[in-house]
Image (cartoon, helix red, strand yellow):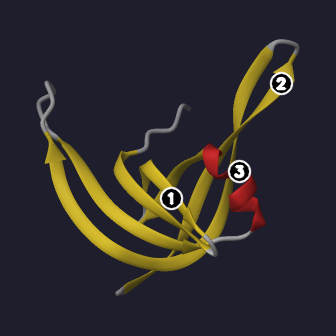
Amino acid sequence: MAKFYGVIGFAISSETSPGVWTDQITERNYRGDVLKNYNSWKETDKVNDDYIIDNYLSVISDPFVYQNFEFIKYVIFMGVKWKIRKIEIQRPRILITTGERYHDQT
């Protein structure tokens, strides 16, 4: 079983001005295990198909994760940001399934 050490990005909404809410990205480092590692391509209407990495990560959690797990947007794995497709809580860990590449809003 491979080991994982990387960044998990949380997008927590906050009111920047009256009636205007924006996501504030908070990145935190976590460690755990890579339980499964699959690679695939998603057929699209674009010239090149999208590359998908279906990783199944088991991450050791802390109280911050348990309070904000619904705000997890991406995980950085092998230097690339990947979207989160599924999160399962199994204390003291969370199980994360990744999907396509995450593209920042900026």
Side of 28 where 98 appears, left or right: left
Please name the residue shown 58% across and 59% down the image.
Answer: 8
The secondary element bearing badge 2 is classed as: strand
Please state the horizontal and vertical placement of residue 7, each as a whole percent of the image: 57, 64
Foreground residue among 16 and 55: 55
Please state the horizontal and vertical placement of residue 20, each as a whole percent of the image: 78, 16
Q: CA distance from mark 2 to mark 3?
A: 19 Å
Disc with the residue nearer the chain's start (1 vs 3) = 3
Foreground residue among 48 and 29: 29
Amino acid type indicated by mark 2: Thr
Mark in front: 1 vs 3: 1
Disc with the residue nearer the chain's start (2 vs 3) = 2
Mark in front: 2 vs 3: 3
Label 2, on which residue? 16
Disc with the residue nearer the chain's start (1 vs 2) = 2
Side of 34 where 88 appears, left or right: right
Label 3, on which residue? 68
Mark in front: 1 vs 2: 1
Label 1, on which residue? 88
Q: CA distance from mark 1 to mark 3?
A: 13 Å
The secondary element bearing badge 3 is classed as: helix
Amino acid type indicated by mark 1: Glu
Q: CA distance from mark 1 to mark 2?
A: 31 Å
